[in-house]
Amino acid sequence: MISYKSSLNKLKISKLKISDQIINSSDCLNRISASNIYCKVFNPSADNAAFDGFAINSKDTKNLNKKIFFNIIGSIAAGDKPFNKKIKKFQAVEIMTGGIIPKGFDTIIPIEKIIFYPNNNKPKKILINRQIKKFQHVRFKGSDYKKNDLIIKKGTILKSKHILALKTLGIKKIKVKKIPNILFFSTGNEITDNDKIPSWKVRNSNSHYINSLSGNFLFNYEYGGILRDEDMGLFSKKIKKMLNSKIDIVITSGAVSAGKFDYIPSVVKKFKLSNYFKSVSIRPGKPILFAKIKGKQKAVFGLPGNPISSAACFRFFVYPYLQESLGIDKEKPIKGILKNNFSKKKNFTRFVKSKINTTKNGKVEVEILKGQESFKVQSFNKSNIWILLPSGKSRFKKGDIVDCFFSDKPNEFFLI
């Protein structure tokens, strides 16, 4: 049995090489950028008005100590072609927010501060009786993005905010990582897809749970069905078929321990492997298996059959593996203040069902829930986060700072 840290190192050196593809930037939600994306234009593309008002040359008001009339020579709306009249002294142009500021003008007087002459209905001039500062209410060319500025770095999980930036800056196509394909099998004669079941059967919840994570955890899901206790040969054929298919990872749930019908390890070990481990000093989920097929960009995970153990192992083994394979930066934990005491075995890493909340004064607190047994679904249903308690320490006290990970989405969804 290896440590959780050692298992992560094995996953890292066994990561898959996921190929790239070019897609429309409007379709990149929850995809991974495969290269740095740089700006090709200036944003704003030209100096423009930040307010509705009038543009003037600030030099015309230098040392102003009397009333001066500025002649109105035109009007500019957002979207109008640049104003190209020759600008003379003491002239002004009406300009709307977003309008391009003509050469010769360098500042904007907001409409609320304008005094019109001879009247507000048919103004021909504006009256100015004070010095106006240069560059007032001006949005400068390239003040947001300049050409060759980095927009998005390689390995970023692309969100709606990125789509907004890409479309604003005219980026139509981008390179992203292909979405990994996962083939999932449930195992065991006890597993059933029926709703009404006798006491000796178990509903097939794991397949539905893993499928529900596919959108947030960046993979395509394919269900392979239920492998029964006598299906050792069938599973071996499924692995062979996977080697020549678009499937990247096979995940099984159950049949990885040491029982009579736990055949997943023996089948997997018949294939040539470049890396392998079975059983990690964790709870829940100790009977977990990982194998990388030698010479192939294919991998197998054997998760425990228990629903909570399976959920924990997906979160803390499969997703970190997807991260490594997709080139995503290591996930950062959310730091929370522990609300209650908890004890565990010193040399085990624990994944603990917990509930996180923010106090009135802005502190992030996290409570370890009752019912930590791996068969108990109720506490998982009440939880909204996992706490990861590392090996090397057995007692955790109220007030300790602990690492937290959302159960149904990456922390990156909240921290980027």
Image (spheres, rainbow, N blue to C red):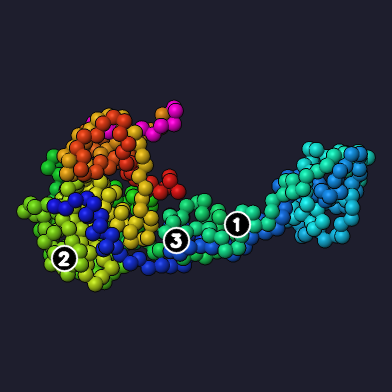
Is residue 349 placed above or below 251 in the rendered structure? above
Highlighted range, magenta: 360-370
Q: Which residue is drawn at 44% across and 28% down?
A: 361
Check the image and name the residue furthest to the right: 118
For label 2, the crowd category at 10 Å Cα-Cα, with few meaning under 14, some 14 to 19 and many 20 or more, is: some
In the rendered image, which quarter is residue 241 located in? Answer: bottom left
Identify residue for label 3.
154
Identify residue for label 2.
236
Chain-order first, disc 2 or disc 3? 3
Asked whether 362 falls inside the magenta stretch, the response is: yes
Tell me, for residue 145, which label it has, or none.
1
Say if residue 198 shows up in the picture.
yes
For label 3, the crowd category at 10 Å Cα-Cα, with few meaning under 14, some 14 to 19 and many 20 or more, is: some
Chain-order first, disc 1 or disc 3? 1
Closer-to-camera residue (399/279): 399
Q: Distance between the residues labelled 1 and 2?
A: 54 Å
